[in-house]
Image (cartoon, helix red, strand yellow):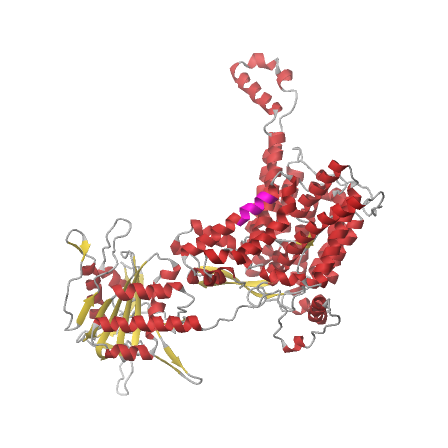
Amino acid sequence: MHRTESYFRRNPGGSSLHRFSFRRKPTRDSTSIPASTWIFNTENHEWQLREDGAQIQLVYNKSEHIPLKDFAAEIRGGKDIKEFILSALVLLDVQDTSIGDLLEIILRRIKQTNQPHNGGTITSPSLSVSNATTTMISNTVSSIASGHRENLNIEEIKQALFVNDRVRILAKTLQATTATETNWTYDQSWLAIMCTSPSILKRHVAIARLKNPCNLGRNCQEARFIVFILSPMKEKGTKNFLETGRTFATIFADIELRAKLLKAATQQEFISIIDKHTDNLMEQQTALTRSSLPDPFDDINTNAEASKDKIYYFPIPSDICMDLSRRLPHYLSDYYDIFQTHRGPQKVLSTAVFLYFACLLPSIAFGVLNSQATNNQISVPKAVASQCLGGIFFSIFAGQPLIVVMTTAPLTLYVKVIYTLCYWYELDFRQTYALVGLWNSFFLILYSIFGVSKIMKWSTRSTEEIFALFVSIAFLVDASRHIYKNFSLTYSTVACEQHDEYWEKYEINKSAMMNLTGEFLQKPCLRDSSLLYLLLALGTVWLGTFLYKFKQTPYLTSAKRELLTDYALPVSVIIMSLIGSILFNQINLPSFTMDSGHIFVMVKFKSINIKQIIGTGVLGFSLSLLMFLDQNIAGAINIINEKFLYRLKKGKAFHVDLFVIAILNGLLSLFGLTWMHGALPLSPLHVKVLADTEERVEQGHIQSVIVKVRETRLTALISHIFIGMSLLMRHVLKGIPMPVLDGLFLYLALTSLDGNQFFERVTLFFTEQAAYPPNHYIRQVPQRKIHLFTFLQLIQLSILCILGFSPILYTKLILPIWLVAMVAFRYRILPKIIATKYLRALDQRL
């Protein structure tokens, strides 16, 4: 189906319509040169060209493919038919062949229907139009909206229907096409005409059946049916003029329906035919079995060549063998094929620099937290060293190298829990930490060998996005806590209160207070430090997000805009670090310590008893659940849109990645280094940085679409080698102000919200309906169900935040259990609240 402009021009001498031609056909006998005149119109401030008294104008035409309505999936289609078929203006056997007269009749009938009679009730007077049988159903929807009665401005609507007063070309139409392998033609038996006007408060639909075929122009020479849609200027995306027109155009595109409508003798029969046809179409589309999208955790491979590589070497670790068979053929290409793509070397450099800052600075920040929580037994240099070793190890041996591993906020909370328990029970922290890590590795190895990652297919998109939003909130909470702590130490202090008291008294009695300066101003007030702390943190996130979105601005050239976007994070960190360290070097800012002690000291297991082994086994099992969920969620979000969004082509390897994470954390535990796993939001951000995107406009909304993703191991490998080299520049790292690290947390939290469908649906609570994006779930799910589903997600997120940020120690150990409980809630309780077909649309992996 195509939306195209029709070409009509009213013949001044009669009621028929003729095609408009821009080119005059010269005759052989004509030898005179046509006279043309250019005239400047002072009213419109534009030039006009006239030839022999006729005005020449330019008209822009555009045709666009519009898909047929899916009445089974798009709920608005069936509702519109049921609503408007009972309130539509129906004209049968109309003899008028002038599109202008016909549209004016329809508009006047709609206006008369909305006139209040008998105490304000809306009536439908019976009128005769060119001996046509006309009827308006008595239960027309009221036009009273927002306390105002609809007042149709017919002249204004007629101007909006056509290009202008002189060129009688319909501005917005819908028409079907009939296509074969060699040719295509317009379906010229019907036409849908659409119009919007600010004087309209609700949608109107009129259907006219012409008594005889009418020539309405080059593309509609045998018209028998006219469908007229009148819509407000601002309307919800699923209820605008185009969607309403698409609904009725889908119905009238069926030749069988049109044949039945031609035989309808009365208006009731006419409506009944459309109603029954719509019901049959909905039943037919609903009965069709819709194939579900492949789940990333299913080992289903439709590639015939890849299926040959499915070799089961052993009966138990078959899932790992299948992952290896998918990824091993691409292992070497992971190192060199990026250089064969457009802008490949530039992407390697920019992404490596991005990962360097995005991994180094959070590892320093989490290292500071671990150092404070463990009395410096896990120091900042150890956190940086573990990030270096873990990143290199994972980038070489992992099955999905685009996943970024690092320590996270939940792991930092878990380390604090272990240290607190050791303090209570007077246990050696390093030994307990190592035992918990080894138990964790043991359970992860079992999970990978027995293919436990398959159960993650029950973890739906909503569950994964809830956890992703929880991680973003954790970044926001950490940064906010640091800012609040700094203000409490430097802004609201006793010294600052003494300063305030001194200056208040100084304004009253300056001479007396000059002698008491030493008594009142014994300690300095450091409010300048707290204000600078806040400015640097907010400045880092502002500059980073500004450069991150700079590609969408019209400034500079396209290549320079993309270059600034690629280096948004490092540029913002470097600039704000220089501002804080050089321009404001006289203001004291909090910094972290980089001790020069030994990093790689193996844990010596002494005086270990059976109770300690059993207790650490329980802690290790809880930790393994957390790592299992986090690692698989990070991998799933990366590959969740394997063929639709991120365009990843080299396959998945969840079981191999889990095995590599188990070995890695076991080695790190032996040296007392920080644990790590696949991290959010860095893993999706890593994919986006390596991707080529383009902006597409759909119904006025700009959509960022990922066209291609470069899959490589080099970016993570190079960046973590640089992180290891940073240990040789400890004095430089100490120059990074703490507020810049908090600004980095805020930047990662905000940029990770892009593409999070859960967050997008939260914003719908505060969005005007006319501005709703044309997403699939907006079309397929009622608005109340969307808000109910989002509200239930917010409740789950709130419980997750309470468990994660609660001051009660043992609640943090329940965090992995609640993640599992959310999956059970999704499959056991939620289908009883919201219909399964709506859940499928809201929760499917697209």
522 or 30: nearer the viewer? 522
Name the side, left or right, on which 331 lies relative to 57.
right
User: Residue placed farthest to the bottom in the image?
Assistant: 28
**In the rendered view, does 272 fall on the left or right side of 335?**
left
- Locate residue 385, reporting x and y percent: 76, 49
Q: Nearer the viewer, residue 524 or 792?
A: 792
In the image, residue 801 lies in the stretch drawn in magenta: yes
Quick check: 528 above or below 158? above
Residue at 43% from the left image edge and 72% from the top image edge: 287
Corner quadrant of residue 229 = bottom left
Q: Is residue 661 visible?
A: no
In-front residue for pair 125/576? 125
Quarter holding residue 39: bottom left
Residue 327 is situated, as x and y percent measured from the top left of the image, at: 70, 68
Question: Which residue is painted at 47% across and 50% down in the image?
Answer: 791
Q: Nearer the viewer, residue 24 or 465?
A: 465
Q: How many discs appear?
A: 0
Whether the magenta-drawn stretch holds residue 811 is answered as no
Classify 326 as above or below 843. below
Tell whether 735 sits left or right of 107: right
Residue 365 visible here: yes
Tell me the quadrant of the picture where the N terminus can be found. bottom left
Q: Is residue 805 above or below residue 627?
A: above
Segment tinted magenta in the rendering: 796-803
Which percent across, then down, holds residue 80?
A: 33, 64
Q: Residue 71 at x, y = what percent?
A: 39, 68
The part of the image, by quadrant, that contains residue 259 is bottom left
By secondary structure, the bulk of the magenta-drawn segment is best described as: helix
